[in-house]
Image (cartoon, rainbow, N blue to C red):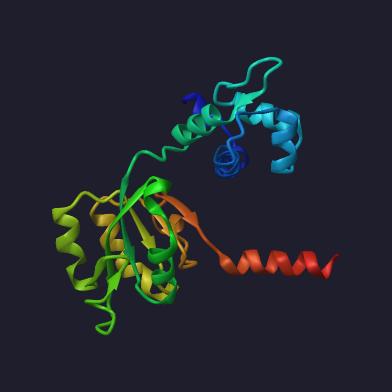
Amino acid sequence: MSKNDSISMSVIRRLPRYYRFLSELNDQNIDKISSTKLAQIMNVTASQVRQDLNCFGGFGQQGYGYSVSQLKEEIKNILGLNNNYKAILIGAGNLGKAVAMHMNFEKLGFELIACFDNNEQKVGSKLNGITVKNESELDDFCNKNHIDTAFLCIPRVCVENVLDKLYSHGIKNYWNFSHYDINARYNDTMVENVHLSDSLMTLCYRMNNN
């Protein structure tokens, strides 16, 4: 087991927030920041900030704090945002269209190289400069191209057949909007599930209990 294997998901899930806030500070030409100030922005304790960053080496200087630009770059490297992973998107409906059009994938470690849909009305249209292909072309495309990950923006009932096809081509990383339990079918996959309804229900709970 490598050191990184022992890092908790709660720490890993805070890294994008560190990166986002540090990017904003960098854009404001702020050179350095203390763990206390960074903790206030993150809404955690200064001790938590130091513990989180010590998982990856620390990066701070006693009496100085953190160099904003340096820490931003360190976290960018830890997150792997320079990897340019090749991705395909399945489903060019309203959700898939929003994902393709409004995510700056290049800055987030990915390159979207193709979009697929089984609706003839969507096939041939363009999403962010990418022509939507018919889902029937998926096998051929996967045979001819190296693909690291698939973004699933299709209804749950449509996932299984597409998933089996993608998995057969060695694709084991998924950004999953479908609510289908990919890990239950293939337990060696890496899946990030996106549940917009869960987030909205959490807001509802907080409003209800305020």
In the displayed structure, 139 sits above or below 40; it is: below
Question: Residue 17, relative to residue 66: is it above or below?
Answer: below
Query: In the displayed structure, does residue 57 sit left or right of residue 136?
Result: right
Q: Residue furthest right?
A: 210
Identified at 71% across, 29% down, the residue is: 35
Tell me which residue sits at (55%, 64%) in the image. Answer: 195
Task: Give the residue at x 76% y 67%.
Answer: 205
State left or right for residue 144 relative to residue 6.
left
Q: In which quadrant of the rendered image does the C terminus lie? A: bottom right
Q: Position of residue 150 (x, y in %)?
A: 34, 57
Decide if residue 106 is on the left or right side of residue 168.
right
Q: Is any part of residue 141 visible from this angle? A: yes
Nearest the eye: 187 or 110: 110
User: Residue 103's spot in the image, x, y percent?
Assistant: 43, 59
* Residue 200 vertical position relative to residue 31 in the rendered view, above or below: below
- Report the front residue among 25 and 158: 25
Q: In the image, is residue 107 above or below residue 175?
A: above
- Picture coordinates of residue 63 (x, y %)? 71, 16
**Which of these two is toward me, 85 or 67?**
67
Residue beneath the point at 26% across and 76% down: 125
